[in-house]
Image (tube, grey):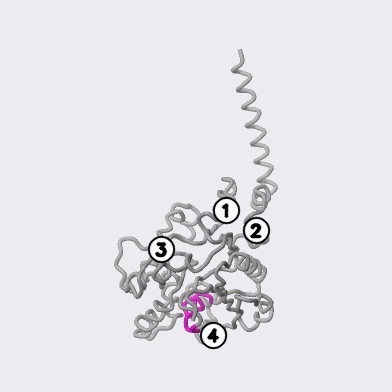
Amino acid sequence: MQQVGLLLRSYADDFDYAKRLVQSFHVHNADDLTLYIVVSEKDFEIFSQLAAPYVEVLSDTHFSPYFTTCEVTGIRPGYINQEIVKLAFWELGLTENYFCVDSDAVFIRDFGESDFLAADGYPYSVLVEDKELKVEPRYFAEHWLSREESLQRIAREVGLTADVLLTCHGHQVFSAEVLRDFRDRFLAPRDWGYLDALREAPYEFSWYNFWLQANQSIPIHPREPLVKVFHHEGHHMESVLRGVTVEDLARGYLAVVVNSNFSRDLGIISTDEPQAATIARYLSYSDLLRALRAKVSLALASRLARSRRKP
Protein backbone atom coordinates (compact mmCIF):
# COMPACT_ATOMS: atom_id res chain seq x y z
CA MET A 1 0.00 0.00 0.00
CA GLN A 2 1.25 3.48 -0.85
CA GLN A 3 2.00 6.01 1.86
CA VAL A 4 0.15 8.80 0.07
CA GLY A 5 -1.81 9.30 -3.14
CA LEU A 6 -4.20 11.86 -4.57
CA LEU A 7 -7.95 11.54 -5.05
CA LEU A 8 -10.16 13.28 -7.60
CA ARG A 9 -13.89 12.68 -7.81
CA SER A 10 -15.13 14.01 -11.14
CA TYR A 11 -17.96 14.04 -13.68
CA ALA A 12 -18.37 14.36 -17.45
CA ASP A 13 -19.37 18.02 -17.11
CA ASP A 14 -16.01 18.68 -15.48
CA PHE A 15 -13.94 16.64 -17.93
CA ASP A 16 -12.13 19.63 -19.47
CA TYR A 17 -11.19 20.84 -15.98
CA ALA A 18 -10.03 17.35 -15.01
CA LYS A 19 -7.98 17.06 -18.19
CA ARG A 20 -6.20 20.32 -17.36
CA LEU A 21 -5.60 19.11 -13.80
CA VAL A 22 -4.08 15.84 -15.02
CA GLN A 23 -1.80 17.68 -17.42
CA SER A 24 -0.47 19.83 -14.58
CA PHE A 25 -0.18 16.72 -12.37
CA HIS A 26 2.13 15.04 -14.88
CA VAL A 27 4.32 18.14 -15.07
CA HIS A 28 4.74 18.58 -11.30
CA ASN A 29 4.50 15.05 -9.84
CA ALA A 30 8.10 14.90 -8.62
CA ASP A 31 7.79 11.71 -6.50
CA ASP A 32 5.69 9.62 -8.91
CA LEU A 33 2.63 9.65 -6.67
CA THR A 34 -0.60 8.13 -7.98
CA LEU A 35 -3.70 10.17 -8.81
CA TYR A 36 -6.94 8.17 -8.50
CA ILE A 37 -9.88 9.52 -10.48
CA VAL A 38 -13.24 8.14 -9.33
CA VAL A 39 -16.12 8.49 -11.79
CA SER A 40 -19.52 6.93 -12.44
CA GLU A 41 -19.95 4.00 -14.81
CA LYS A 42 -21.57 6.25 -17.42
CA ASP A 43 -18.59 8.64 -17.30
CA PHE A 44 -15.92 5.93 -17.22
CA GLU A 45 -15.36 5.79 -20.97
CA ILE A 46 -14.63 9.49 -21.42
CA PHE A 47 -12.32 9.60 -18.40
CA SER A 48 -10.47 6.44 -19.40
CA GLN A 49 -8.52 8.52 -21.92
CA LEU A 50 -6.85 10.22 -18.94
CA ALA A 51 -5.46 6.92 -17.63
CA ALA A 52 -1.66 6.88 -17.75
CA PRO A 53 1.32 5.97 -15.61
CA TYR A 54 0.49 7.30 -12.12
CA VAL A 55 -3.11 8.09 -13.11
CA GLU A 56 -5.76 5.44 -12.43
CA VAL A 57 -9.43 5.85 -13.39
CA LEU A 58 -11.81 3.93 -11.12
CA SER A 59 -15.53 3.27 -11.24
CA ASP A 60 -17.56 4.41 -8.25
CA THR A 61 -19.45 1.09 -8.03
CA HIS A 62 -17.82 0.28 -4.66
CA PHE A 63 -19.37 3.42 -3.17
CA SER A 64 -22.76 3.32 -4.89
CA PRO A 65 -24.47 1.45 -1.99
CA TYR A 66 -23.69 4.50 0.14
CA PHE A 67 -25.10 7.02 -2.35
CA THR A 68 -28.31 9.01 -2.23
CA THR A 69 -30.68 9.92 -5.06
CA CYS A 70 -32.39 12.65 -3.04
CA GLU A 71 -31.39 16.13 -1.98
CA VAL A 72 -29.85 16.46 1.48
CA THR A 73 -30.62 19.72 3.29
CA GLY A 74 -31.28 21.31 -0.10
CA ILE A 75 -28.02 20.06 -1.63
CA ARG A 76 -28.17 18.05 -4.86
CA PRO A 77 -27.40 14.31 -4.67
CA GLY A 78 -24.28 14.52 -6.84
CA TYR A 79 -22.62 16.93 -4.43
CA ILE A 80 -23.41 14.78 -1.41
CA ASN A 81 -22.22 11.63 -3.19
CA GLN A 82 -18.85 13.18 -4.00
CA GLU A 83 -18.48 13.93 -0.27
CA ILE A 84 -19.23 10.26 0.43
CA VAL A 85 -16.55 9.14 -2.04
CA LYS A 86 -13.97 11.25 -0.23
CA LEU A 87 -14.91 9.84 3.17
CA ALA A 88 -15.09 6.22 1.95
CA PHE A 89 -12.17 6.04 -0.51
CA TRP A 90 -9.86 4.57 2.15
CA GLU A 91 -11.96 1.39 2.08
CA LEU A 92 -10.36 0.40 -1.25
CA GLY A 93 -7.05 -0.12 0.56
CA LEU A 94 -5.00 1.61 -2.13
CA THR A 95 -3.16 4.17 -0.01
CA GLU A 96 -2.63 4.96 3.66
CA ASN A 97 -3.30 8.66 3.10
CA TYR A 98 -4.80 10.64 0.25
CA PHE A 99 -4.91 14.28 -0.72
CA CYS A 100 -8.34 15.32 -1.98
CA VAL A 101 -8.17 17.61 -5.00
CA ASP A 102 -10.92 19.22 -7.10
CA SER A 103 -11.33 19.11 -10.88
CA ASP A 104 -10.84 22.87 -11.23
CA ALA A 105 -7.44 22.78 -9.51
CA VAL A 106 -4.17 23.32 -11.37
CA PHE A 107 -0.81 22.32 -9.93
CA ILE A 108 1.66 25.19 -10.18
CA ARG A 109 4.87 23.76 -8.71
CA ASP A 110 6.58 20.43 -8.15
CA PHE A 111 5.29 18.39 -5.21
CA GLY A 112 6.08 15.13 -3.48
CA GLU A 113 5.46 13.07 -0.35
CA SER A 114 7.02 15.66 1.95
CA ASP A 115 4.33 18.17 1.00
CA PHE A 116 1.65 15.85 2.42
CA LEU A 117 3.43 13.82 5.11
CA ALA A 118 5.39 14.99 8.15
CA ALA A 119 8.76 13.49 9.08
CA ASP A 120 7.10 10.78 11.22
CA GLY A 121 5.05 9.56 8.24
CA TYR A 122 1.72 10.89 9.45
CA PRO A 123 -0.17 13.34 7.21
CA TYR A 124 -0.27 17.06 7.63
CA SER A 125 -3.67 18.38 8.68
CA VAL A 126 -4.97 21.59 7.10
CA LEU A 127 -6.55 23.37 10.07
CA VAL A 128 -7.50 27.04 9.84
CA GLU A 129 -10.11 29.54 11.07
CA ASP A 130 -10.80 30.94 7.56
CA LYS A 131 -10.75 34.51 8.81
CA GLU A 132 -10.21 35.89 5.30
CA LEU A 133 -13.62 34.50 4.38
CA LYS A 134 -15.30 35.62 7.59
CA VAL A 135 -14.47 39.25 6.79
CA GLU A 136 -15.57 38.91 3.15
CA PRO A 137 -19.07 40.51 3.02
CA ARG A 138 -20.45 38.37 0.22
CA TYR A 139 -19.18 35.07 1.58
CA PHE A 140 -20.33 35.94 5.10
CA ALA A 141 -23.83 36.78 3.89
CA GLU A 142 -24.24 33.75 1.61
CA HIS A 143 -22.39 30.99 3.42
CA TRP A 144 -20.68 31.76 6.72
CA LEU A 145 -23.54 31.79 9.22
CA SER A 146 -25.16 28.54 8.09
CA ARG A 147 -21.76 26.86 7.82
CA GLU A 148 -20.76 28.01 11.30
CA GLU A 149 -23.96 26.56 12.75
CA SER A 150 -23.28 23.23 11.02
CA LEU A 151 -19.69 23.13 12.27
CA GLN A 152 -20.82 23.67 15.83
CA ARG A 153 -23.26 20.78 15.40
CA ILE A 154 -20.48 18.49 14.17
CA ALA A 155 -18.25 19.50 17.08
CA ARG A 156 -20.99 18.63 19.57
CA GLU A 157 -21.64 15.27 17.91
CA VAL A 158 -18.01 14.14 18.00
CA GLY A 159 -17.35 15.57 21.47
CA LEU A 160 -14.91 18.28 20.42
CA THR A 161 -14.69 20.99 23.05
CA ALA A 162 -12.68 23.88 21.69
CA ASP A 163 -12.96 27.64 21.94
CA VAL A 164 -11.74 27.95 18.36
CA LEU A 165 -12.96 25.55 15.68
CA LEU A 166 -10.25 24.69 13.16
CA THR A 167 -11.13 22.98 9.89
CA CYS A 168 -10.86 23.53 6.13
CA HIS A 169 -13.07 23.86 3.05
CA GLY A 170 -11.26 21.17 1.11
CA HIS A 171 -7.92 19.91 -0.16
CA GLN A 172 -7.21 17.97 3.00
CA VAL A 173 -4.89 15.00 3.43
CA PHE A 174 -7.15 12.21 4.70
CA SER A 175 -5.74 9.40 6.83
CA ALA A 176 -7.21 5.93 6.38
CA GLU A 177 -6.46 5.25 10.04
CA VAL A 178 -8.53 8.24 11.17
CA LEU A 179 -11.41 7.43 8.81
CA ARG A 180 -11.47 3.79 9.92
CA ASP A 181 -11.61 5.00 13.50
CA PHE A 182 -14.41 7.43 12.58
CA ARG A 183 -16.43 4.65 10.97
CA ASP A 184 -15.91 2.06 13.70
CA ARG A 185 -16.10 4.26 16.80
CA PHE A 186 -18.48 7.01 15.72
CA LEU A 187 -20.71 5.92 12.84
CA ALA A 188 -21.17 2.23 13.69
CA PRO A 189 -22.33 2.66 17.34
CA ARG A 190 -25.03 5.03 16.08
CA ASP A 191 -25.98 2.70 13.25
CA TRP A 192 -25.05 5.52 10.89
CA GLY A 193 -23.49 5.49 7.46
CA TYR A 194 -21.58 8.32 5.83
CA LEU A 195 -24.86 9.67 4.45
CA ASP A 196 -26.38 9.96 7.92
CA ALA A 197 -23.49 12.13 9.06
CA LEU A 198 -23.85 14.36 6.01
CA ARG A 199 -27.59 14.69 6.63
CA GLU A 200 -26.67 16.05 10.04
CA ALA A 201 -24.18 18.51 8.53
CA PRO A 202 -22.92 18.33 4.90
CA TYR A 203 -19.25 19.12 5.56
CA GLU A 204 -17.11 16.03 5.05
CA PHE A 205 -13.81 17.72 5.84
CA SER A 206 -15.09 19.03 9.16
CA TRP A 207 -16.37 15.60 10.20
CA TYR A 208 -12.83 14.34 9.60
CA ASN A 209 -11.04 17.32 11.16
CA PHE A 210 -13.18 17.51 14.29
CA TRP A 211 -13.05 13.75 14.87
CA LEU A 212 -9.27 13.89 14.52
CA GLN A 213 -8.96 16.75 17.01
CA ALA A 214 -11.40 15.23 19.50
CA ASN A 215 -9.85 11.74 19.48
CA GLN A 216 -6.33 12.24 18.11
CA SER A 217 -6.23 8.86 16.38
CA ILE A 218 -2.91 9.98 14.90
CA PRO A 219 -0.50 12.81 15.73
CA ILE A 220 -1.74 16.17 14.48
CA HIS A 221 0.64 18.19 12.32
CA PRO A 222 -1.19 21.44 11.45
CA ARG A 223 -0.58 23.22 8.16
CA GLU A 224 -2.04 26.17 6.35
CA PRO A 225 -3.88 25.42 3.06
CA LEU A 226 -1.85 23.74 0.32
CA VAL A 227 -4.14 25.08 -2.41
CA LYS A 228 -5.06 28.72 -3.08
CA VAL A 229 -8.80 28.88 -3.72
CA PHE A 230 -10.53 31.90 -5.24
CA HIS A 231 -14.04 31.37 -3.92
CA HIS A 232 -15.76 34.08 -6.02
CA GLU A 233 -15.00 36.60 -8.75
CA GLY A 234 -14.29 39.47 -6.33
CA HIS A 235 -11.76 37.29 -4.54
CA HIS A 236 -10.02 36.50 -7.83
CA MET A 237 -10.29 40.03 -9.21
CA GLU A 238 -8.55 41.47 -6.14
CA SER A 239 -5.58 39.16 -6.63
CA VAL A 240 -5.37 39.96 -10.35
CA LEU A 241 -5.52 43.71 -9.76
CA ARG A 242 -2.70 43.41 -7.24
CA GLY A 243 -0.59 41.81 -9.94
CA VAL A 244 -0.18 38.45 -8.17
CA THR A 245 1.25 35.98 -10.70
CA VAL A 246 1.35 32.19 -10.81
CA GLU A 247 5.01 32.40 -9.81
CA ASP A 248 4.00 34.41 -6.74
CA LEU A 249 1.30 31.88 -5.79
CA ALA A 250 3.75 29.00 -6.23
CA ARG A 251 5.89 30.34 -3.40
CA GLY A 252 3.11 29.41 -0.99
CA TYR A 253 0.87 26.84 -2.67
CA LEU A 254 1.00 23.58 -4.64
CA ALA A 255 -2.05 24.42 -6.73
CA VAL A 256 -4.61 27.10 -7.43
CA VAL A 257 -8.39 26.91 -7.92
CA VAL A 258 -10.58 29.48 -9.63
CA ASN A 259 -13.89 28.12 -8.35
CA SER A 260 -15.85 26.80 -11.31
CA ASN A 261 -19.13 27.41 -9.45
CA PHE A 262 -18.85 31.08 -10.42
CA SER A 263 -16.45 30.98 -13.37
CA ARG A 264 -17.93 28.17 -15.46
CA ASP A 265 -19.96 30.53 -17.69
CA LEU A 266 -16.79 32.52 -18.39
CA GLY A 267 -14.89 29.55 -19.81
CA ILE A 268 -11.97 27.74 -18.23
CA ILE A 269 -9.86 30.53 -16.77
CA SER A 270 -6.13 30.07 -17.07
CA THR A 271 -4.24 31.04 -13.95
CA ASP A 272 -1.48 32.64 -15.99
CA GLU A 273 -3.46 34.55 -18.63
CA PRO A 274 -2.66 38.29 -19.01
CA GLN A 275 -4.09 40.60 -16.36
CA ALA A 276 -6.21 42.52 -18.87
CA ALA A 277 -7.78 39.32 -20.20
CA THR A 278 -8.88 38.18 -16.75
CA ILE A 279 -10.31 41.59 -15.86
CA ALA A 280 -12.18 41.66 -19.17
CA ARG A 281 -13.86 38.33 -18.31
CA TYR A 282 -15.44 39.78 -15.20
CA LEU A 283 -16.43 43.25 -16.44
CA SER A 284 -19.43 43.84 -18.69
CA TYR A 285 -19.33 46.41 -21.49
CA SER A 286 -21.33 48.79 -19.28
CA ASP A 287 -18.79 48.28 -16.45
CA LEU A 288 -15.95 49.05 -18.84
CA LEU A 289 -17.75 52.14 -20.18
CA ARG A 290 -18.41 53.46 -16.67
CA ALA A 291 -14.78 52.82 -15.72
CA LEU A 292 -13.59 54.67 -18.86
CA ARG A 293 -15.84 57.62 -18.11
CA ALA A 294 -14.59 57.75 -14.54
CA LYS A 295 -10.99 57.54 -15.74
CA VAL A 296 -11.51 60.45 -18.15
CA SER A 297 -13.25 62.51 -15.46
CA LEU A 298 -10.43 61.91 -13.00
CA ALA A 299 -7.82 62.81 -15.60
CA LEU A 300 -9.60 66.06 -16.47
CA ALA A 301 -10.03 66.96 -12.80
CA SER A 302 -6.36 66.28 -12.15
CA ARG A 303 -5.32 68.40 -15.13
CA LEU A 304 -7.58 71.24 -13.97
CA ALA A 305 -6.16 71.07 -10.44
CA ARG A 306 -2.60 71.27 -11.79
CA SER A 307 -3.44 74.27 -13.96
CA ARG A 308 -4.91 76.13 -11.02
CA ARG A 309 -1.71 75.60 -9.02
CA LYS A 310 0.45 77.25 -11.69
CA PRO A 311 1.50 80.86 -10.96
Measured Cα–Cα span from mark 1 to mark 4? 36 Å
Q: Name the residue under label 4.
A: 64
Q: Contact (CB < 8 A) between labels 2 and 1?
A: yes
Residue where numbered disc 1 is placed: 236
Residue 85: in magenta span? yes
Graded by Cα atoms within 10 Å as few (under 14), some (14 to 19) or many (20 or more), the crowding at tag 4 reads few
Q: What residue did someone put label 2 on? A: 269
Earlier sequence position, callout 3 versus callout 4: 4
Q: Nearer the viewer, residue 18 or 52?
A: 52
Up-down relation of residue 88 to residue 165 (above or below): below
Few, some or many residues within 10 Å of mark 1 (<14, 14–19, 20+):
some
The reply to whether dot 3 and dot 1 touch (C-beta < 8 Å) is: no
Q: How far apart are marks 2 and 3 (CA)?
A: 28 Å
Mark 2 to mark 1: distance in Å? 11 Å
Q: Nearer the viewer, mark 2 or mark 3?
A: 3
Q: Which amino acid, mark 1? A: His
Residue contact between numbered discs 4 and 2, judged by CB atoms under 8 Å? no
- Which type of secondary structure does the marked residue at label 2 adopt? loop
Q: Position of residue 151 (x, y in %)?
A: 39, 67
Dot 3 amino acid type:
Leu
Q: Nearer the viewer, residue 232 or 121?
A: 121
